[in-house]
Amino acid sequence: MPRTLYEKLVDQHVVATIDDSHVLLYVDFHVMNEYTSPQAFAGLHSAHRPVRRPRAHLAVVDHVNPTRPITDLSQIEDAGGRLQIETLSANCARHGIQLFDLFDPRQGIEHVVVPENGFAWPGMVIACGDSHTTTYGAFGALAFGIGTSEIEHVLATQTLVYKVLKPMQVRIDGALPTGTSAKDIVMAFVERVGAAGASGFAVEFTGTTIDALSVEARMTLCNMAVEAGARAALIAPDQKVFDDLAGRPQAPKGAALADALRDWQDLRSDPDAAFARVVEIDTRAIAPLVTWGTSPDQSAPITARIPAPQGAGDQRALDYMGLDAGQPLDSIAIDRAFIGSCTNARIEDLRRAAAILDGRTVADGVTAIVVPGSKQVRAMAEAEGLDAIFKAAGFDWRGAGCSMCLAMNDDVAASGERCASSTNRNFEGRQGRGARTHLMSPEMVAAAAVTGTLTDVRTLMKATP
């Protein structure tokens, strides 16, 4: 029977069938951070269990750390955050798990450092205590976020009780219009199906638009698919993926790579495979998007006006955001601009933002920061001179970490402040209690930073600074 890519990956990793909808699934690789792992290790220790396969795990410090320069942990003012980092270090040392700590040259956001070090391969099952683990679907890996009890289960057994999803195909065809990017594609998808429209589904992105995207752009797409409720997001691996993996530290090499490539070639949905739902998106209808509410599906083209509320949820969002229906989106002034996160802090993202900022300066009254996704991304950007462009424009050039994506570290927006952000979530209080977040692409953040209002980046692309 023809099968989808998702079904093939599940079948290849089933250890045992539990019932009609659940299986025991083998996990090839597991990623941890300092925020979601402490309770899992505590449970493991109280049960006197060892870690079954220490080399199949990687730990990263990224959520609670400051992005300003520090030389030792004593300089972290948040005692709770410091304790989480110290606890992760102790747990990894106890069990022989590799750790990219705060002072490791490979440190950065987990969903940036895993691909750049070659840990994510086509055909893998990857789990992590973070919902945006779907990022690795860009490599043809089945990757998903898990809870604390599941982290403990993976540590102890290298398996998970897994509820099998329904496959959804999202077909996207056509060339990307000027000024749009993968961020706009995925925001259009989330707006189209709704914040729960992909719940219970594993999404597979297909079509000529996807084929043309870089691997980094595909990571953005898979990363934010979870904002539509998708537990998994996949793109069939192709030569771009194979080339991207070649030479990365943890990727297969030599004869092992040749063997792997033969297997990876078959990792795609069969032509006649049946999907439970099919969504088609024409890129010709996509414009640069921004969110106006407090859910990622509450977005509209930058050229539009805020829509009339369709219910109490929309009205609550407008009240929280301090906005009115009918207000032009490009009339909204901002206080902050943030470029970063596991969605948009890779080198391509920084290059696109820098291209808009080159020769321009941040508007008066706007505080702007850029946080590379990893120390390696930061080094690449500095080698290309991108840091000089950001600094000259008035952006604060930071170290690696989750930073302003969520209010768990030093980078927090004040109540009532409005932030143009390249992140993935705009929930109430996400960037600080009472803070107001507008999601958009990195280049759109750059445009907003220099004009002081939400701005159509295409107007700056056409103009001469």
Image: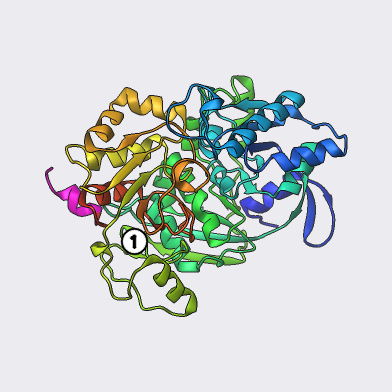
Picture residue at 47% right of the left edge, 80% below the top: 311
Picture residue at 35% right of the left edge, 75% below the top: 307
User: What colouring style does the render use?
Assistant: rainbow
Q: Position of residue 136 (x, y in %)?
A: 56, 42
Q: How crowded is mark 1: few (under 14 residues within 10 Å), some or many (20 or more)?
A: many
- The answer to which of 413 and 44 lies nearer the viewer is 413
Picture residue at 70% right of the left edge, 57% below the top: 1
Determine the secondary structure under disc 1.
loop
Residue 355, placed above or below residue 270: above
Residue 457 appears left or right of 190: left
User: What is the magenta range?
Assistant: 457-465
Give, as a three-letter code, the residue at label 1.
Answer: Ile
Res 253 quadrant in image? top right
Q: Position of residue 345 (x, y in %)?
A: 42, 39
Residue at the top extreme, as displayed: 254
- The answer to which of 388 and 81 lies nearer the viewer is 81
Q: Where is residue 88 in the image (x, y as percent from the top left)?
A: 67, 32
Q: Position of residue 40 (x, y in %)?
A: 75, 42
463 inside magenta stretch: yes
How many numbered discs, if any? 1
- The answer to which of 452 and 351 lies nearer the viewer is 452
The answer to whether any part of residue 157 appears in the image is: no
- The answer to which of 138 and 360 lies nearer the viewer is 360
Residue under pointer 1: 286
- Please name the predominant secondary structure of the magenta segment in the image: helix
